[in-house]
Image: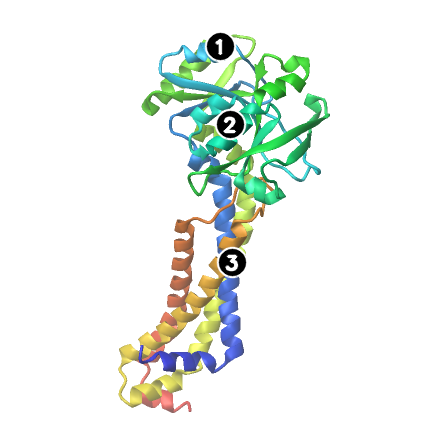
Amino acid sequence: MKFLPLLLANLRRKKVRTALTIGSFMVAMFLFGLLAAVRAGFRQGVEVAGADRLVVIGRTGLIQPLPIPYMQRIRRLAGVKDVAHSTWFGGIYQDPKNFFPQFVIVPEDWQRLYPEYRVADGEWRDFLADRQGIVIGQKLAQRFGWKIGDHVPLKAPGYLGGTSWDFNVRAIYRGTRPQDDEGQLWLQHRYFYEKAPRYWQGMVGWYIVRVSDPGQALTVLKAIDKEFANSASETRTQTESAFAASFMKQMGNIEFLILAIGSIVFFTLLLVTGNTMAIAVRERTAELAVLKAIGYSDRFVLALVLAESLLIAAIGGAIGLWFARGMAARDITSGILPTYLSGAALAAGAAVALGTGFLAGLLPGVSAMRLQVVDALRRV
């Protein structure tokens, strides 16, 4: 710590350049954080998928609804512990751009299948008592400023008649893990079937199946598809992680483009920053030689250069990651992806920043360390 004044004095020599170098690091790490948050959003479904849950959809995809009687037939199969069903609603709130997931659920079944989502007991009872009641995620509530008791009108999509449906916010759920999606809306199946067109009676969107033994999930999913083979509504069963991964593959090109373009910009910023820091150190080669002339060792000179470089990287990186974490907590994808910046991503960002600072200072530092005092002073 006794050499800290010397280190700070070096940084204050050219304040504008030091500030710009720190700013470059800040921008680079801010971009790194946003890229990590978007990537986590694309992979969120896979990461939070239950190892013991299967998803049963129509063979042609989610556009093919399945008959309600399938539920009991699935329940009777060996290895099946529990079953629930859900249906995509797809209503519009004020503007089509206000996208967020909306699921028709049977409350009791949903609560058993997804225990990671927590709702206060009193709020859950209010939800059960109101057929027009809805449960919303905490982030969805923050996004639109909704609170318990609010009235929420949604325009139903065309396949449901395109009419206005009225809902009452009765509960707000919270995830037990940082990556849990808190941007969903759940509505009761009773209200859905009261208002839905006649052809929806007796049909559901998909089934969620909990297996007794996750190790036997492959056997169970094959048994489910075999049960409904050659029927009017054949099924395609996947593990929940595989089902989520299939959605991710559909957006794979978008993810690749975002990450590719962002990565190029990010590394360009780091190269420019590293070059600027290297130039700043080389400008003071003669001064470093003076330190060696008055008795400081070669290792001290190297350590001083590296400390200066690492300090700039640490300050800029910390500010950039702090801003990125705050931005990731906001709705930066308009509800399409639940973004978040994990502790592992923050640690990786810090490692990248410090690693870049170390490399930027290493080459000029080694050069200064090896430089003969006579040769260096000859340049003054």
Q: Residues within 10 Å of mark 3 (few under 14, many from 20)?
A: some
Q: Quadrant of the N terminus?
A: bottom left
Q: Nearer the viewer, mark 1 or mark 2?
A: 2
Sequence-first disc among 3 and 1: 1
Disc 3 to disc 1, C-alpha distance: 53 Å
Between 53 and 133, which is closer to the camera in this rendering?
A: 133
Left or right position of 117 against 99? left
Q: Which mark is residue 94?
A: none
Q: Which mark is residue 125?
A: 2
Q: Which mark is residue 323?
A: 3
Q: Quadrant of the C terminus?
A: bottom left
Residue 127 visible (yes or no): yes
Marks 3 and 1 close (CB-CB < 8 Å): no
Dot 2 falls on a residue whose secondary structure is helix
- Kind of residue at badge 3: Phe
User: Which residue is found at the position 55% from the left and 28% from the top?
Assistant: 127
Dot 3 falls on a residue whose secondary structure is helix
Q: Which quadrant of the structure image shows residue 88?
A: top right
Which residue is label 1 attached to? Answer: 229
